[in-house]
Amino acid sequence: MARIVKTEDAVGEVLLHDITAVDPDKGFKGRIFKKGHIIREEDVRRLKEVGKDHIYVFEIADDEIHEDDAAKMLAKAVAGENTRSSQSPKEGKIDIYADAFGLCKIDTKRLMSFNSVGEPSCPTIYNNSVVKEGDNIAAVRIISLTAPLEEVQKACEIAGDGIVKVIPFVPKKAGLIITGNEVYHGRIKDKFHDKLKPKLEELLCEIAEKRILPDDRDAIRESIEEFADRYDIVILTGGTSVDPDDVTYKAIKDAGVRKFIRGNPIQPGNMLTMGWIGETPIAAVPAAAIFFKWTSFDIWLPRFLAGDTIERDEVIARAHGGLLQKIKEIR
């Protein structure tokens, strides 16, 4: 329940919520009075300047919960592995941060159920985003200053052991197989290595061995099998198009990979091919990776290095947002 008090009559009352202000000229939006502040005579004018002609004084019933207490409950429920929360609510909100460099995982089904309860609210970043330690990945609050306790408890039950978590990247080694007669015989210089090396190193993966092979299906297959036993990921380049001499994707299939997927609805990089030997991802990178900043390889690489196995349904769903040249940021 709440009663309304005129601001000039609220001197001595305790604020039960933060008072915020917006000043576009100064680029300011934030708290000017903190929850718990005792209103003084000199505060009345400032409160009226930000449109507070009345102050709400709450008397919280037994079946209600205040926004700050709700935020604490919700943050504890939502925050999963390798995350941390802000120390105290601000404007009734608690932010959740990554506590490691890695891949952010959002349980989107539970997130939708959580946000369908009523008062509880939890926006997040995109699922499978690469995050650094300290990045803000989610926030929780209730919409009003108080909410039914039952709703907050229900949202916490839905969150279970956490809706957001971070899978840390760990140092890994890659085997790189460059294919193509033109490179093998020295007609042209390999350009893939220098393009892929920084992408891998950014995610703590070093190229431990590089091998250049001709368009020989058996030789490529043998190297795939050998590298899969030796390294954490096997990356191949060339030989993924429809030309008769392009046999790389056939060699991958010959190697007995599981979950073989050739092509994806992402441009650039439509012809990317993937599969797994045991737990080792095998990926053939199309030539687009030489020419474009972002390709399908940039979408899937963090997933490979985080230990995910990609399902065909996920690949198909990636058509939404798959026109990479037309978006500002990879999702």
Image (cartoon, rainbow, N blue to C red):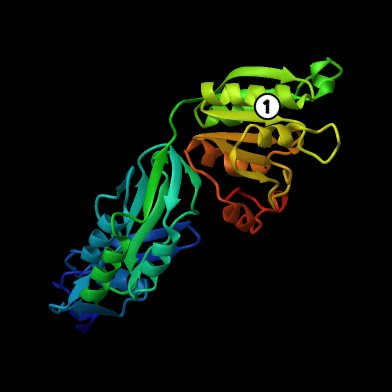
> On the rendered structure, is 134 left or right of 2?
right
Q: Residue at x 32, y 76 (%)?
A: 52
Q: How many marks?
A: 1
Q: Which sits in the foreground, 132 or 311?
A: 311
Q: Is residue 112 above or below residue 139?
A: below
Disc 1 target residue: 221
The residue sitting at the top extreme is 186
Q: Position of residue 206 (x, y in %)?
A: 54, 23
Residue 60 in which image quadrant: bottom left
Quadrant showing the N terminus: bottom left
Residue lying at 56% horizontally and 37% vertically, measured from the top left: 276
Which residue type carries mark 1? Arg
Identify the residue at image location x=50%, y=48%: 128
Q: Where is residue 35 drawn, in percent x and y?
A: 22, 64
Circle 1 packing at 10 Å, graded few (<14), some (14-19), many (20+), is: many
Q: Is residue 175 above or below residue 316?
A: above
Q: Residue at x 50, y 47 (%)?
A: 129
Note whether residue 148 is visible.
no
Left-right relation of 315 to 124: right
Whether residue 157 is situated above or below residue 174 in the rendered picture:
below
Q: Does residue 296 show up?
A: yes
**Left of 68 or right of it: where is 287?**
right
Tell me where residue 212 sits by quadrant: top right
- Viewer-nearest residue: 236 or 294: 236
Q: Indicate the position of residue 239 as horizontal and vertical percent values.
A: 77, 33
The answer to whether 154 is drawn above or below residue 222 in the figure is: below
Q: Nearer the viewer, residue 186 or 220?
A: 220
Give the secondary structure at mark 1.
helix
Front-lying residue, 57 or 167 = 167
In the rendering, at what x and y percent does residue 246 appear? Answer: 81, 33
